[in-house]
Amino acid sequence: MRWVVLSICLAALDCRGNPLAAPTANDAGTIAGGRGAIDAAPPAMAVDASDVDGSADARVQTTTGGGLGTADGGDAGLPLCPAPTAPDGGTQIASDGWSPPTSVPFSCNPLPSAFFFPPPGSDVSGTYARCASFVAPRADALAVGTDGTRAALIGADGVARVVDLASSTVVGVLAPPRATVGLAAFSPSGDTIVTVAPGEQEVTLWRGDTFAPLWTTTLPGVLYQEVFGSGAAFSPDGTTILLSPGDSVYLLDVATGAVRASMSPRGAVLSLGYGWNGQRIAVLSAPVSGMCVYEPRGGTVTILDAKTLAQLATPMTWPMEGDEGPERGGMLVASAADLIVTTGPSDNPEAMQAFRISDGSPLPAPVLRYPTPLALTPDGTAALEAQNGVLELVRLADGTVAATTPSAPPSAFAISADGSTIVTGSSGASLLGTWRPAAGPLVATCTGDVPSDGAARSALSVDGATVAVDWGTEIRLFRRADGALLSRMSLAPKKASSIQLSPDARYVIGTFYDPAEAGYSTTLFRTSDGMALADLGAAPSSGKLVGFAFSSDGRRLAAASQHPPTGTTVLQLDLETGAWTSGPQSSGYPWVVGLSGDCVLIVDGSTLASACARCQTRTLVTDTQSGVVSFDSTMYLGLGAASEPTSTKLWSIGPQPELVRIYPPRDGAGAETPAAVSAHGERVITGAANLEPCAPGQEYTCRVHDVATDTVIDELPPTFTSASTDLNVLAFGPVLWCAR
C-alpha cells in the first residue's frame, strides 16, 4: 500500500472576474477519520494509491481521441450519464438572515467577534443590506475627539465603533446599511462625527450623542476604484468638512451635506489636511503607474485656499523617473501651525524638508531621529515616530525626545486637536491603545483575541446558517444567527489564505501560507471538532488537483487530477471511508465545477459535461470557458467561449439543457463574469472584469439579476465570496448581506 499525496487548487470567480486560487503545497498526508463518526474521531485510516492510479480495483477510464472517455477505450454500448437532477430532499434555507441587532454599549476589552446590523428603514433603497459581520478585530483607521475622551475605531468590516477611552466601552456604532466606512473625523465640539465610505463614495454625518445619521451625501465619481489614500477633517470653526475618498478633494457644508467646492489633482490623493488654524489646506497627490503592479509614484504637494480650493502654491514635487519610480513622497501637516513637513520618496533623512503652509516658502529642515515620522503634533513643535517597539515624541527644533512609551508597531494612529491624547491601533492585544504623554505610558484600551493582518476570507453553508471565516492562523466556524463560535481549525503558525465549506458545514478545506517556508499547504478539516482529516500535497502518482466540489449531501468531494503530459483523471473521495475512486480520464485539462449524484460536472475545453464511471459522458453546454453550478445541479452560469466570449450565459442543464438568459458586458467593462446562481435559477449574480493584462484601477459591482423579469435588482460590492443556495444571504469577505 502506498500513501496518496494530492495537491488541491481551489478556484472560483469573485465579482471582479478574478480567479481565487490557492497555490499548491508539497506536504504528504493521510485521511484521519471519515464521516461515519463526526463527533468522535475514529482511528486514522490511510488512502491507498491503488484506488487512484489504475490498479485492480480502480475504475479508470481511458481517453479516445481527446476529451472525456470511458472504460475499454470507447463509449459503444454504454448508457449516457444521467442528466443533472436536484438532490433528494430539500435543503432547509434560512430565508430571513436577520438577527437581533447588537446592543450598545458593550465592552471592547475584548471586542466581540460578531456584529449584527439593525434592519434598514424603508427610506433605504436596495434589495439587500448589511446584516452581520464576523472578522478578527483590527484597527484599519482611527480618529480621536478634540479633548481625547473618545475615539472611532474602524475595522475591516467597515464599521466605526465609537469608544469611550476611559472605560474601554463602545458607546456608539456608525454602520451605514449599504456602505463600508473607511475613515472618520470628530467635529471640534464633538457633537457630530463624519464617516466616509470610499468604495461607495458615501459621506454620512452622525450625531455625537445618539449616533443617529443627520444626512448622507453621495459624491460624484467611480465606485470601488482602487484607493491609495484618503482623509477627512472638520474646519476649526466646525462649519465645513474637508475630505477625499481617494481621487478628488471636496469641501462639504456641515449643515446640509452640500458640496461647497471640489478639485481633482493629477493622480491619486494620498493625504490632506487643514493647517495654519484652518486658513490653508495641503494635499499630497501622485500619479499611479507600474508594470502590472500599480502604485503611486513620486508626487506633488499642493497648497489650497481653505474656502475655494484654489491652488496657491506647489512647494514640493517628486518627478516621475519611470513606470516604477520613484517611490511615493510623504507629507505631514501641523493643523494649528504654519508648517508642512515632507519626507521621501526614499528612506533618506536628507530628503526631509519643511515649508510654510501659508505661502509654500521653505523653512529649515526638522531634526528628527528617523526619516519617516508618523504625524506632527497640532502645534507643530514635535513629530510622532515609531521604531523598534517604541513610540516617541521628538522635538523638531533639536531632535530631542520629549516623551516615549513602549508600543507595538501601529497600523493606525490619531492625535487629538488639543494635543493631549494619541491613540494607536493594530490587532490582538494592541487593538487600541491610549497614550497621554503628560500622564504616563500607553494604556491598552481595546483588545482582540488574536493578531490579524486585516485580510478576511469567508464561506457560507448552503442554508446560510453557518459561516467559516479566516481568523489569522485559524479558520473559525460561527453560527450566523447569534455569532456563537462552533469550532476552530488551525495550522499555526501558518496563516489561512482560502476557505471552502461543505454544503452541510461538516467539512472545511483551508489553504494556509507558511511565512517561514514561503509555501502553502491545503488541509481538509472536520468542523465538529476542528480535526485535520487530510493534508493534501503533491506527488507524481496522482498529479495536481485543480478543481474541487462537494456533493450536495456533503458525503463526497471530487477533483480533477492533472498529470502532464498524459492528461487528467477525475477523482472522488468518500468522506465516510476515506477512499479515493478514479473516474473518467481526459487528454486535456478539465475543471471540476460540481457533483450531481454519482456524476462529476466538468468544464473540459469549451464544454460542460456530466462524467461518471461506466457510462458515456453527457454533453450539457458547449461554447463555455468557466462557470458555476447551482447547489441543486440544475442551473449553470458560465462565461461564453468562441461566441460571445465577453458575455455570461445562464443555462438550465437538466434534464434538457436550455439557454435561459444572456448577460452582455456592462458599459466600460471588458466582460460580464459569472459569480453565483440560485437553486432553480430564480436569481443570478454577475461581476465584471477588464480583459487587458494587468489592468489597473476600478473594481466592478456585483449585479443581482432577477431571471424571470431580466432586470438588475441590486448592485453590491465587488468582493463576493459565497452565498446561501437561495441567494438570500451573501458573503462579501467577513461581512454578510441579507435580502430584505
Image (cartoon, grey):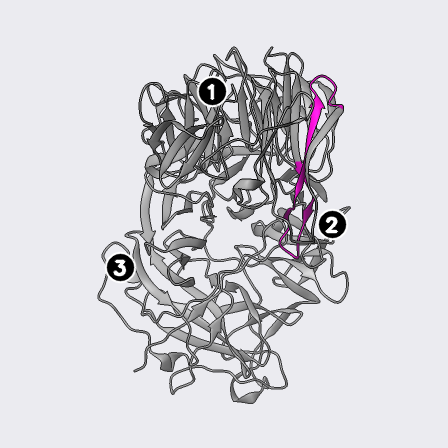
Placement of 407 over or under 237, stated as above or below: below
Q: Do residues under tags 3 and 1 come within 8 Å of each other at their CB atoms?
A: no
Crowd around label 2: few <14 · some 14–19 · many ≥20 (10 Å): some
Residue drawn 31% across the image and 47% down it: 487
Q: Is residue 560 left or right of residue 466?
A: right
**Which label's residue is closer to the chain start, 3 or 1?**
3
Q: Quadrant of the C terminus?
A: top right
**SS for callout 3:** helix
Residue drawn 41% across the image and 16% down it: 149
**SS for callout 2:** loop
* Disc 2 target residue: 669
Three-letter amino acid code at disc 1?
Answer: Ser
Q: In x, y percent, where is residue 596? A: 51, 64
* Disc 3 target residue: 37
Placement of 674 over or under 423, stated as above or below: below
Q: Quadrant of the N terminus?
A: bottom left
Three-letter amino acid code at disc 3?
Answer: Ala
Q: Nearer the viewer, mark 3 or mark 1?
A: 1
Compute the Cα span from label 1 to label 2. Answer: 43 Å
* Disc 1 target residue: 416
Chain part drawn in magenta: 285-310
Q: Do residues under tags 2 and 3 come within 8 Å of each other at their CB atoms?
A: no
Viewer-nearest residue: 5 or 144: 144
**Which label's residue is closer to the chain start, 2 or 3?**
3
